[in-house]
Amino acid sequence: MPPQLLPASAAAFAPRASSVNVVLGSKVEPWLTQTLKRINRVKRPLNSIPQHQRCLTETLSSPNAIWTLASLMLPKAPESELRQDSNPLIEAISNYQIIHAEAYIVHVDMVLRNEVAYKLTPGSIESLIEYHKDIYCVDAKADTYDWPEKEQHAKKLHDDFIQAINKFVFRTHVSALEGLEEEGAGELLCGKSEEVKNNIMGLLNKPLLPPPPKIVDVVRQPPLLPSSPVGAHIWSQSTPSPAMPAPVEPWRVLPSSPSVTSSVESTTPIWANMGLHEIQVPSPTVPYSQPYSTAGMFYSSPMVTSPIPALPLPSMLASQCGVGAGYGGGFGGFGWDRYQEYTTTI
């Protein structure tokens, strides 16, 4: 990309130079020749590149060579002081003013970038600075809340605008010189004025921003839920599952009370010949209960337990063997007279 070269007169706060820097190429465009012939009252020879350069330089260096880049309609006073009227035309005339953005040419380049550069006149710069200070900044401060450094921020906003508007240089294609008039004055053509207006309004309407809110540290108590990272090591411990009861051998289980049913063939119960002192009934087994655990608070699949096998009762055996095999013979060679020893063994 070609370097952007500008003369010293284009710098911020620099005065206008007595001569404009004009650089022409090896060939002069026909439209430039026609433009120079049109604006000159006195006919001058334009047969060579130096003659074109000399004529253009003298024309643009004239004190009257002031261009109107754009016209801005701005309020005359802060919003709180504007006049209210039922007639919109009277209200607009009373409350608004037109500021012309005037400029002079500081640089013409037809070799590298084919551009022309404009710099605002001191009068236009002063008018824009005055509007920004007395009207725009007042409205900006009224539209924002108060904070301790508000005045300093507003002053800095205005100082930044002063720097920006003095540095403002509008650059466009050299074809803008077709709008050249007598004594070097002129106006921008082909919608370039709207571009200048948008650029200047962008510098004017910088917002007055309040400081960002301060971040306050909020102390949060750790949650007491199981998902809390603080107590994760406590809840992460697996809850021991309740121990399954060991299977009981059938021959070690003795019913706690004799059956009241008897065989159809037997009319006298087997237990009738026994005294209460001869029978030692084991104490009832404490029903099994699961130990307390927090696992019950959560859903889990139902436990699978093995069924306890059904055990035969003495009455059932008696019905098969008969009364004769009951007390005298016993079961399997083990008589009921040794019942006390049997219960002791258990």
Image: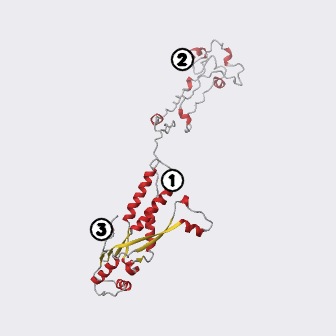
Q: Position of residue 50 (x, y in %)?
A: 27, 82
**Residue at the front extreme?**
63
Q: Nearer the viewer, mark 2 or mark 3?
A: 3
**Residue at the top extreme?**
277
Comes first in the chain, label 3 or label 1 = 3
Residue marked by disc 1: 144
Comes first in the chain, label 2 or label 1 = 1
The quadrant holding residue 172 is: bottom left
The quadrant holding residue 48 is: bottom left
Q: Nearer the viewer, mark 3 or mark 1?
A: 3
Give the spatial CA distance, label 3 vs label 1. Answer: 40 Å
- Dot 2 surroundings within 10 Å: few (below 14), some, or many (20 or more)? few
User: In the visual, does 91 lie left or right of 49?
Assistant: right
The number of callouts visible is: 3
241 w.r.t. 281: above or below: below
Q: Amino acid at mark 2?
A: Thr
Residue marked by disc 2: 345
SS class, disc 3: helix
Q: Image point 50% across, 37% down: which residue? A: 223
Comes first in the chain, label 2 or label 3 = 3
Q: Who is closer to the viewer here, 209 or 56?
A: 56
Q: Amino acid at mark 3?
A: Ala
Residue marked by disc 3: 8
Q: Position of residue 108 (x, y in %)?
A: 33, 75
- Dot 3 surroundings within 10 Å: few (below 14), some, or many (20 or more)? few
